[in-house]
Image (cartoon, helix red, strand yellow):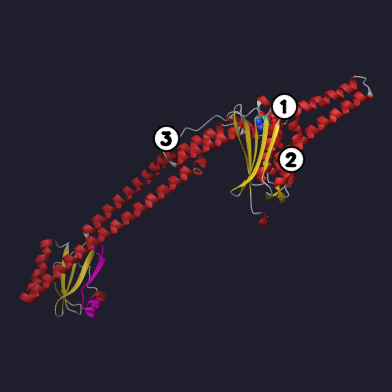
């Protein structure tokens, strides 16, 4: 369980959140501490410098005697544990000081004196008062020619501030770590709760329960976007699964009839004594049914190979006008048999790069359908022309027409409209035609008006014959 929590995004984000929050707060504290101590120290330094100025002025006015008295009086006034004054010669010899019992172990710093003499500018240093835990800030400064003042102030306030700050720092940091970890965890868990819902829905979805959908967050946030995408993906999957089911039902249905018939012929030949002629007829029927089956299976293979981009298409410069005319010549007797008027308006010399056999198959399927689904005395017109870098081939009929909701469905494998089930067919013709045309980078669309017939439009890209 713990292991699982460590692996969650929420845990890792909360950890990052806490880490960043803690580091930022730590930096802020350090900066504040640095600024505060700097301010305190510069205040102390200023006080020391002010004292040095006082000594300088008194020596100027009253001589060294005045300075001696001032040292004693000033230290008494401020507190002898708080401040001290020592007047020394540049040699380090002390000639006057305030009461030094508390400061007796703070000596004149030889190094500081040397620096002062060399640089001729005041020297500050921070020292630890021996045998105490106190720190002091010391100033060495010339107050008259050959007279140096060593004065120091106990940094009591500084130490108090430091220890108070330490306590506040530790307390605040503990609070910040706990607060940021808890609030970070809760916030991130809340933000990611939508993901958990999506996961739950995904887990609940099985082949039989594709209807489940995730409820949106209602906000225009990333999660809502994810939910919408996830739901539309489910819509698509549901649609696909449905069409696969329908397709397999259709395949089963369409394969069942010829196989049943073939079985019937075989059974008949076994159970009945028939004449040789009858056996011949039965054998030829069996071959016919088997051919139909093979044709269906081959067509299915062509479609799936072409859809997978593995079709054996051979593109060559093709005179499309001739190809269409030849196909029309082939179908004209069929139309004539049904007393259907057959019109052709075909532009001459349309050249494209095509696999002529395949394209002929696609066009023939459309033509075959137009004649098949047009009742006697109807009309079928073929139009072929170039238009804006495209070749357009229109097959218009006055047939049984198609309802708009089936415009896309009729291109699916094995789909046959109820009204056309009485005519012979496999439901693969349009699917194959569209696949072939799409392999030529073209497309097929349909429009139809109830009672008026249908128009199938095949478009193919056209490029100058010189560049094919
Ligand atoms: P088949 O013709 O073998 O049934 P197709 O794939 O060629 O299969 O056509 C699929 C379905 O589309 C047909 O069953 C029919 O319902 C409809 N259809 C195709 N062409 C036409 C047309 N010209 N007029 C009316 N319906 C058509």
First in sequence: mark 1 vs mark 2 = 2
First in sequence: mark 3 vs mark 1 = 3
Near-viewer residue (245 or 265): 265
**Looking at the figure, which quarter contains the C terminus?**
bottom right
Residue 19 located within the stretch drawn in magenta? no
Image quarter for ligand 1 equals top right
CA separation in Å, label 3 and label 1: 52 Å
Q: Which mark is residue 423?
A: 1
Residue depth check, mark 2 versus mark 3: number of the one nearer the observer? 2
Quarter of the image for residue 105 reads bottom left
Quarter of the image for residue 115 reads bottom left
- Residue 292 appears in the picture as rendered: yes
* Residue on which disc 2 sits: 327
Query: Would the CB of label 1 be found within 8 Å of ligand 1?
Result: yes
Q: Which residues are magenta?
A: 113-135
Residue drawn at the location 46% of the way across and 34% of the way down: 216
Near-viewer residue (93 or 428): 428
Near-viewer residue (150 or 331): 331
Picture coordinates of residue 63, whole percent (x, y): 7, 76
* Residue on which disc 3 sits: 218
Relative to residue 184, is residue 128 depicted above or below?
below
């Amino acid at each position: 369980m713990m292991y699982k929590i460590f692996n969650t995004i929420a845990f890792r984000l909360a950890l990052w959140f806490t880490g960043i929050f803690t580091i930022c707060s730590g930096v802020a504290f350090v900066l504040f501490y640095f600024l505060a101590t700097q301010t305190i120290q510069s205040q102390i330094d200023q006080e020391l410098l002010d004292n040095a100025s006082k000594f300088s002025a008194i020596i100027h006015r009253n001589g060294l005697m005045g300075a001696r008295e001032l040292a004693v009086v000033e230290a008494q006034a401020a507190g002898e544990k708080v401040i001290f004054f020592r007047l020394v010669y540049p040699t380090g010899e002390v000639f006057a000081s305030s009461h030094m019992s508390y400061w007796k172990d703070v000596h004149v710093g030889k190094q500081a004196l040397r620096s002062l003499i060399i640089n001729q500018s005041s020297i500050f240093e921070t020292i630890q008062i021996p045998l105490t835990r106190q720190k002091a800030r010391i100033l060495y400064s010339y107050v008259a020619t050959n007279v140096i003042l060593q004065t120091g102030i106990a940094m009591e306030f500084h130490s108090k501030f430091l220890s108070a700050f330490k306590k506040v720092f530790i307390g605040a940091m503990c609070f910040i770590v706990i607060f940021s970890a808890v609030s970070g965890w809760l916030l991130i868990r809340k933000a990611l709760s939508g993901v958990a819902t999506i996961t739950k829905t995904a887990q609940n979805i099985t082949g039989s329960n594709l209807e489940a959908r995730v409820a949106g967050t209602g906000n225009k946030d990333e999660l809502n976007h994810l939910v919408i995408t996830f739901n539309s993906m489910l819509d698509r999957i549901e649609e696909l699964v449905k069409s696969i089911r329908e397709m397999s039902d259709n395949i089963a249905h369409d394969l069942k009839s010829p196989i049943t018939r073939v079985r019937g012929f075989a059974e008949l030949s076994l159970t009945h004594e028939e004449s040789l002629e009858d056996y011949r007829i039965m054998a030829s029927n069996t071959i016919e049914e088997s051919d139909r089956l093979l044709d269906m299976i081959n067509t299915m293979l062509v479609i799936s190979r072409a859809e997978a981009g593995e079709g054996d298409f051979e593109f060559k410069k093709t005179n499309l006008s001739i190809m269409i005319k030849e196909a029309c010549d082939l179908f004209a007797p069929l139309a004539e048999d049904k007393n259907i008027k057959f019109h052709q308006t075909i532009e001459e010399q349309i050249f494209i790069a095509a696999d002529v056999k395949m394209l002929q198959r696609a066009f023939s399927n459309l033509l075959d359908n137009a004649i098949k689904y047009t009742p006697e005395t109807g009309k079928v017109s073929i139009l072929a022309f170039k238009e804006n870098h495209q070749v357009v081939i229109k097959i218009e009929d006055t047939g049984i027409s198609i309802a708009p909701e089936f415009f896309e469905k009729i291109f699916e494998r094995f789909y046959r409209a109820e009204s056309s089930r009485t005519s012979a067919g496999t439901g693969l013709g349009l699917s194959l035609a569209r696949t072939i045309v799409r392999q030529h980078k073209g497309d097929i669309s349909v429009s139809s008006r109830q009672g008026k017939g249908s128009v199938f439009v095949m478009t193919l890209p056209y490029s100058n014959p010189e560049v094919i």
